[in-house]
Image (tube, rainbow, N blue to C red):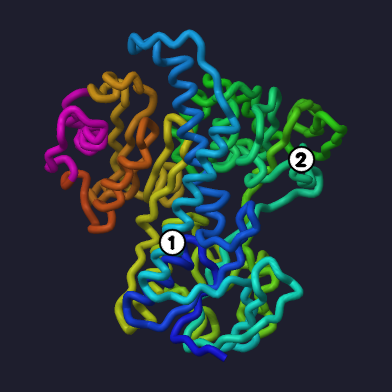
């Protein structure tokens, strides 16, 4: 039986990062991962790299280029009267990107002398894990021991009884990344991050997309001012977003899906060629054996952990989607780093108040900190600065004038409480706000910082000036 200082269960963005940081700190580390690719080969990277963050962004970029050439290039004097999309080649490009990155992680494991245990891990005791070889249920299992164990098993798509996934006509987010052609009519259940991103991909390529959302409010976690503007823009692009629409049933034949739903007007139906179920994700703890060894979990399957990611078992930690907080890859990664450093006797740090969120529609939506409606509910005393992208010289030059930057700061201290961006490259622009908030920065700090001209980042600068009602260009 092999003995390790640390065994990480899960090789996604939380697990593999935790394993690398443990190894960097001199800990004898192993990582258990059972993910199999399309060729039935074990790979690292988990959901994010294999069927989540990376492949979805590859398709979003490809579809954005196609849409730009077809609809916007003429505004730049580029004439491309005949444009077509090779979906097979687009999917192959996505696969190649994923393969390159998964192989890269395997290379990092070798470089850092991390032992990759290719299989499914299950607790036998607080210090002992049984490993079942990946893709071989009849293979002989074996056990390893560790002084410390990090659970990083991630999450899986949720399902709903009215729309059972068959991965043919009714698919989850994984199936939506592997369509071999463009559906003429596409239904999406759920107007969250996943539903909007996948709906955008296939809408750009020509699908008639209907998105059914049970909630009456569009993008509830997003600042209302930006969410309302984003809804208008996405509808203008062709997404048929129907709020307050609760799906009650689906019926499939060989070619199409009939979706039954209810809204304020009563019982409704819509017929589509493909249906994506994107109603959220749940913690992946099935078969982990956590209950058997006494690890505390809640009724939804989340592992209970303290502010240091430690479970009720002193040597067992849990990170990422299996614990409280947002299901974000970068949150999982930073928790992995923090836990590794705590195990090594260092002061691992993670500021949960400065975690950025991004929705990769176009324009992109990104934010950090609190929304204005949250602050109003708290009775906080705050100031707001807004700056429209239409007033940005760089955005004008790009032809990307939709959106805005909104900055909120404390009225007394001027400390930044939240920054919300709707616009081109918002996913990159938000990092400046995250850095400022990490150091308890003020709007004045950003206002006094020189920004290159012309850049999109100037919109953040102008929003900070607007907090004090001294924006120069608006």
Locate residue 162: give its quadrant: top right
Please tell me which residue lies in front, 394 or 212. 394
Q: What element carries label 1?
A: helix
Looking at the rendered structure, the secondary structure element under dot 2 is loop
Q: Where is residue 22 in the image (x, y as percent from the top left)?
A: 38, 76
What residue is at 42 percent from the left and 69 percent from the top?
Answer: 109
Q: Quadrant of the N terminus?
A: bottom right
> Where is 434 relative to 6, above or below?
above
Quarter of the image with the C terminus is: top left
Establish if 401 lies above or below 24: above
Query: In the rendered image, is residue 466 in sight?
Result: no
Name the residue tied to disc 2: 168
The residue drawn where x is 59% and y is 30% is 87
Q: Give the range drawn in magenta.
A: 446-474
Q: Which residue occupies 43% across, 30% down?
A: 363
- Residue 21: % across, % down: 36, 72
**Is the residue 252 above or below the residue 368 in the image?**
above
């Amino acid at each position: 039986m092999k003995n390790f200082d640390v065994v990480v269960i899960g090789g996604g963005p939380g697990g593999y990062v935790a394993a690398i940081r443990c190894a960097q700190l001199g800990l004898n580390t192993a990582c258990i991962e059972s993910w199999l690719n399309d060729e039935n080969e074990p790979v690292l990277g988990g959901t994010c790299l294999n069927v989540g963050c990376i492949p979805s962004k590859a398709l979003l970029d490809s579809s954005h280029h196609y849409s730009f050439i077809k609809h916007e290039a003429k505004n730049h004097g580029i004439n491309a009267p005949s444009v077509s999309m090779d979906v097979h080649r687009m999917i192959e490009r996505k696969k190649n990107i994923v393969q390159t990155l998964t192989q890269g992680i395997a290379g990092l494991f070798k470089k850092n002398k991390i032992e990759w245990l290719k299989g499914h891990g299950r607790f036998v005791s607080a210090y002992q894990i049984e490993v079942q070889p990946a893709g071989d249920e009849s293979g002989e299992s074996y056990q390893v021991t560790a002084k410390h164990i990090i659970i990083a098993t991630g999450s899986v798509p949720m399902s709903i009884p009215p729309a059972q996934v068959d991965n043919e006509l009714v698919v989850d987010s994984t199936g939506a990344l592997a369509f071999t052609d463009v559906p003429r009519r596409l239904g999406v259940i759920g107007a969250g991050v996943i539903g909007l991103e996948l709906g955008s991909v296939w809408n750009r390529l020509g699908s008639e997309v209907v998105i059914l959302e049970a909630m009456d409010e569009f993008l509830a976690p997003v600042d209302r001012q930006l969410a309302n503007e984003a809804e208008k823009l996405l509808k203008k692009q062709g997404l048929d977003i129907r709020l307050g629409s609760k799906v009650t049933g689906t019926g499939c034949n060989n070619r199409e899906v009939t979706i039954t739903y209810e809204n304020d007007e009563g019982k409704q139906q819509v017929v589509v060629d493909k249906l994506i179920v994107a109603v959220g994700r749940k913690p992946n703890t099935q078969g982990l054996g956590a209950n058997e060894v006494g690890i505390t979990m809640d009724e939804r399957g989340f592992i209970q952990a303290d502010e240091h990611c430690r479970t009720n078992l002193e040597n067992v930690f849990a990170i990422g989607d299996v614990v409280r907080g947002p299901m974000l890859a970068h949150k999982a990664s930073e928790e992995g780093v923090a836990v590794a450093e705590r195990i090594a006797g260092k002061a691992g740090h993670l500021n949960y108040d400065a975690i950025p969120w991004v929705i990769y529609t176009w324009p992109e939506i990104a934010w950090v900190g609190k929304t204005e409606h949250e602050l109003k509910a708290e009775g906080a005393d705050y100031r707001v600065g807004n700056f429209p992208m239409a007033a940005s010289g760089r955005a004008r030059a790009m032809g990307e004038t939709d959106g805005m930057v909104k900055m909120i700061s404390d009225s007394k201290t001027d400390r930044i409480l939240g920054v919300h961006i709707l616009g081109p490259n918002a996913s990159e622009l938000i990092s400046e706000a995250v850095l400022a908030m990490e150091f308890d920065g003020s709007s004045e700090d950003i206002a006094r910082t020189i920004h290159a001209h012309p850049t999109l980042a100037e919109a953040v600068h102008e929003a900070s000036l607007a907090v004090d009602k001294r924006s120069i260009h608006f």
